[in-house]
Image: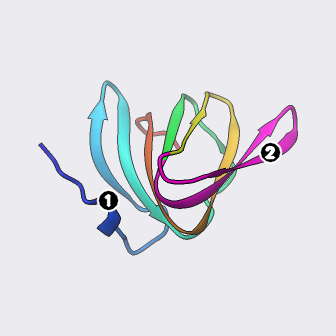
C-alpha cells in the first residue's frame, strides 16, 4: 500500500517524477513542473490528469495547433501518434499513466 500526498510533492527539477505503480506494462507517475515539456509523440496511449494548478495542453490536429486549458480534475488522453506538449501555468502537479519507457 502507498499513500501519496501529491500537494507536497516538489522535486528539484521540472518534470521529475515519483513512480506510484506499474500496472501491466503501464506506469503511473506523479510529476511536478513549472516549465513546459517538449513537443512529443508517444508510442502508446497516455492519460494526463491535472491534480493541482493549471496546464495549457497544446496538440496538433491535421497540422493545426489547438490549446486546451486543463485545471484540477481535468484529463487529457493522447492516443499513439498524437503530437502534444504541456505548458503549466505557474506550478502544476500531474498524474501521468502511460506505457513503461514512454517519453
Which residue is outermost to the bottom? 12
Q: Residue at x 66, y 45 (%)?
A: 40
Sequence-wise first label, 2 or 1: 1
The vertical placement of 6 against 8, above or below, is above
| Model colouring | rainbow
| Coordinates of residue 50 in the picture (x, y in percent) | 49, 51
Q: Which residues are magenta?
A: 50-73
| Count of numbered labels shown in the rendering | 2
Label 1 element class: helix
Label 2 element class: strand
Q: Residue at x 83, y 45 (%)?
A: 65
The circle on residue 66 is 2
Q: Residue at x 27, y 40 (%)?
A: 21
- Kindly indicate the quadrant of the structure image that contains residue 5: bottom left
| Coordinates of residue 9 in the picture (x, y in percent) | 32, 66
- Kindly indicate the quadrant of the structure image that contains residue 1: top left
Q: Residue at x 63, y 63 (%)?
A: 36
- Asked if residue 62 lies in the magenta stretch, the reply is yes
| Coordinates of residue 52 in the picture (x, y in percent) | 45, 59
| Coordinates of residue 10 in the picture (x, y in percent) | 36, 70
**Magenta part, dominant SS:** strand
Circles 2 and 1, Cβ within 8 Å, touching? The answer is no
Which residue is outermost to the left? 1
Nearer-the-camera pick, 98 or 95: 95
Q: Residues within 10 Å of mark 1 (few under 14, many from 20)?
A: some
The vertical placement of 1 against 16, above or below, is above
Q: What residue is pinned by disc 1?
A: 6
Disc 2 and disc 1: Cα gap in Å? 29 Å
Nearer-the-camera pick, 36 or 69: 69
Q: Residues within 10 Å of mark 2 (few under 14, many from 20)?
A: few
Which residue is outermost to the top? 24
Amino acid at each position: 500500500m502507498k499513500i501519496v500526498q501529491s500537494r507536497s510533492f516538489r522535486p528539484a527539477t521540472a518534470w521529475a517524477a515519483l513512480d506510484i505503480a506499474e500496472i501491466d506494462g503501464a506506469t503511473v507517475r506523479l510529476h511536478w513542473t513549472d516549465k513546459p515539456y517538449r513537443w512529443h509523440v508517444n508510442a502508446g496511449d497516455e492519460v494526463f490528469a491535472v491534480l493541482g494548478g493549471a496546464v495549457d495542453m497544446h496538440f496538433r490536429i491535421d497540422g493545426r495547433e489547438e490549446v486546451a486549458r486543463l485545471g484540477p480534475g481535468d484529463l487529457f488522453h493522447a492516443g499513439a501518434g498524437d503530437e502534444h506538449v504541456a505548458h503549466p501555468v505557474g506550478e502544476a502537479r500531474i498524474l501521468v499513466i502511460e506505457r513503461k519507457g514512454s517519453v
